[in-house]
Amino acid sequence: MPRLLLTGANGFVGKILTPRLQRHGFHVTAVSGTNIADQSTADVQVVCDINDAHSLAAVVRETAPTHVVHLAAVSHVPTSFIQPLQTWQTNVMGSLNLLEAIRTHAPNAFVLFSSSSEVYGGAFQLGEPVNEDTQCLPLNPYAASKVAAESAFREYFRQGLDGVIARPFNHIGAHQSHDFVTASFARQIALIEADKQAPILKVGNLDARRDFLDVQDVCSAYLALLDLTGNTEYPRCLNIASGHSRRIGEMLDALLAQSIVQIDVQLDPARLRPSDIPVAAGNSDALRKATNWQPAVPIEKTLSELLDYWRKKICHEAIIS
Ligand code: GDD
């Protein structure tokens, strides 16, 4: 049975990806920087900060993975402005700690690195959905750190490591932190409906446009990429995108349309960013050609499930408090 080591296993994507990997036939060692997750189904759970090179090397040595999926990162753009050192340290040096551990203890492993569409930054201004040949022009510390980490992966690939860099566009769904836009809006609606927030929904830049995918579709793409192990006939860097951008205001309207309460929308200047990409859309022809992947979940369904998730969560929190 192939053995897969997953970093960031306790995060939004990691929690959803773990059972999908297991159903795909992997024995999963879930590595997280925080506590062991209560409800994780992982075969083995390990608490290890990727910034701790020594402990991480021991985990890789003991696991002897055939596959690695690297999700662990500081992933919130505003946080990366406030804590740039932690962002660079975790996203770049954490990745290098992992790469060195793999080079030393699991040199034949296939490695999937989850980068980000944020790397394109200023290049989105071209207007077209960007492809992998588009120049990277990062506009924030998070994006710049992902470009640097990609560079590290490319160097290890050049030296013979097998693997791929994925550039997922915005992915959303239940369990995502309300630091991110759709979760923030859905949570506020649920709080207002439960009479736990005044009927004023705070927002940032509603004019920005993003290429949204359901998190399950991104997990499907990761599984398809893992199936490329041993195949050298595909690009080493692949977008995961729908190809269409949606206005943040349109996502808000779709969520508000599902609520019967009267809600006012108010701009919260604290939610505006020093720099924000106005329009992001990705071309994922290369991924579709390499794997036949395509998105399967309509975003309307994702948004509806997201709001239900937050309604249940707020209701549950009210019962136990
Ligand atoms: N978070 C947040 N909260 N964003 C808001 C809000 C709000 O109240 N109101 C408007 N926005 C706008 C932001 O300014 C941005 O233009 C857009 O909504 C999306 O913000 P986020 O959900 O925070 O995501 P992101 O685009 O910055 O980054 C996400 O996607 C990347 C992939 O493209 C993150 O998940 C990154 O980790 C990921 O790499």
Image: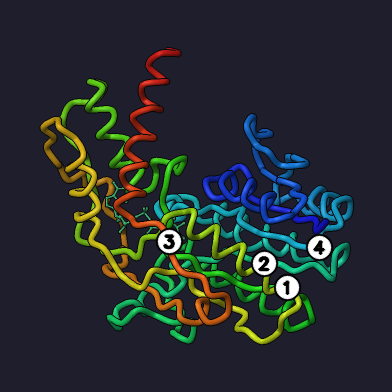
Q: Residue at x 35, y 76 (%)?
A: 122
Instruction: Give the image quadrant in which the ligand numbered 1 is located.
Output: bottom left
Q: Which residue is mark 1?
A: 229
Can you say which quadrant of the picture contains the C terminus? top left
Comparing 223 with 64, the one in front is 223
Image coordinates of residue 242 in percent, x first then y, are 38, 69
Task: Quote the CA–CA distance across marks 4 and 1.
Answer: 10 Å
Q: Residue at x 19, y 35 (%)?
A: 259
4 or 1: tag closer to the N-terminus: 4
2 or 3: tag closer to the N-terminus: 2
Q: Which residue is mark 3?
A: 296
| Residue type, label 2 | Leu
**Tag 2 and tag 3, C-beta contact below 8 Å:** no
**Residue 278 relative to residue 43: left or right:** left
Q: Where 210 falls versus 30 (above or below)?
A: below
**Tag 4 and tag 1, C-beta contact below 8 Å:** no
- Decide: few, some or many residues near mark 2? Use Cα within 10 Å; few <14, some 14-19, many ≥20: many
Comparing 101 with 66, the one in front is 66
